Amino acid sequence: MIITSHLHDWNVTPQQAVAIQERMRHFVETADRLPEIFHVAGVDVGLEESGQIARAAVVVLSFPNLKRVDQAIARRPVEFPYIPGLLSFRELPAVLDALARLHIQPDIILCDGQGIAHPRRLGIASHLGVLLDVPTIGVGKTRLTGYHIEPPDERGGWVPLQDKGEVIGAVLRTRPGVKPVYVSLGHRLTLQTAIQMVMACTTRYRLPETTRQAHKLASGHS
DNA sequence: GCGACAG
DNA sequence: ATCTTGTCGC
């Protein structure tokens, strides 16, 4: 898959995008195939110029220290509309540019959005993971698809996110008394490992430090 | 046909 | 995502 990544054509119609997802979903790996983790990256995309320009930001933190050791930004004109389920076709072009500018390549990437907790099991985290053949995790602030009960109100408490009878992710409470986050495996790891990683990257806020810091970079500050 | 719908 | 101040609560 990675050897054909350079052939990926982002100039597609929503209908073609759906067809691409249906083909790519079969390349997602749901078992652990990770290296020893020394660096964790967080990616996020913000918009500029009234939504005409996508600004992707990536931060690389040492692990488990969580100290920033590298970062990069990339801007690109937005050429795909926002359509629930097709977010990756709108944001990944800029994200790939930003990742290419890093000096330190991460061992795993946490994405702002879903992994396989997606209608066709290929959210932005899984799409990125398969394209680069790198371990990825999806961390969404809200739900795209699936159903669940309320997770325990304690740090680390979680319940499965299900869809059509299968577990597609976890609704994880990273802080007591605060809305939970939606965690799903993106590529090359299990849901259990994904949950552990998200918890290890989360300190005193609802979102992991990776996504928090990437968010700051993508939308102005820091 | 109606409601849901990552960022 | 983004437009935006103050305000409620631990």
Image: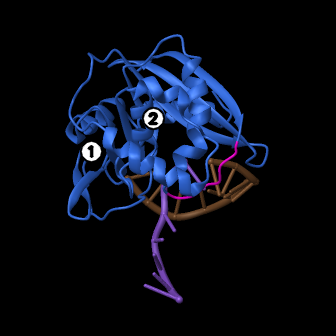
Chain colours: A blue, B purple, C brown
Q: Where residue A123 appears, x then y in whole percent?
A: 43, 47
Report in which chain the residue with disc 1 lies.
A
Under tag 1, what secondary structure? loop
Front-most of residues C10 and A46? A46
Q: Give, as a three-letter code, the residue at label 1.
A: Arg
Picture quarter with the C terminus of chain A: top right
* Residue on which the image places disc 1: A155
| Main SS of residues in magenta | loop
Residue located 25% across and 33% down the image: A189
Q: Is residue A134 above or below residue A119?
A: above
Q: Which mark is residue A11?
A: none
**Is disc 2 in the same subunit as disc 1?**
yes
Q: Is residue A208 above or below residue A36?
A: below
Picture quarter with the N terminus of chain A: top left
* Residue on which the image places disc 2: A128
Q: Where residue A91 appears, x then y in whole percent?
A: 58, 41
- What range of the chain is rendered magenta? A78-84
Badge 2 density bin: few <14, some 14–19, many ≥20, Cα 10 Å: many
Q: Is residue A133 above or below residue A161?
A: above
Residue located 33% across and 38% down the image: A27
Residue located 58% across and 56% down the image: A14
Report in which chain the residue with disc 2 lies.
A
Front-most of residues A115 and A155? A115
Q: How far apart are the alpha carbons under marks 2 and 1? A: 28 Å
Determine whether, in the image, residue A164 is placed left or right of residue A67: left
Place residue A52 in its image quadrant. top right
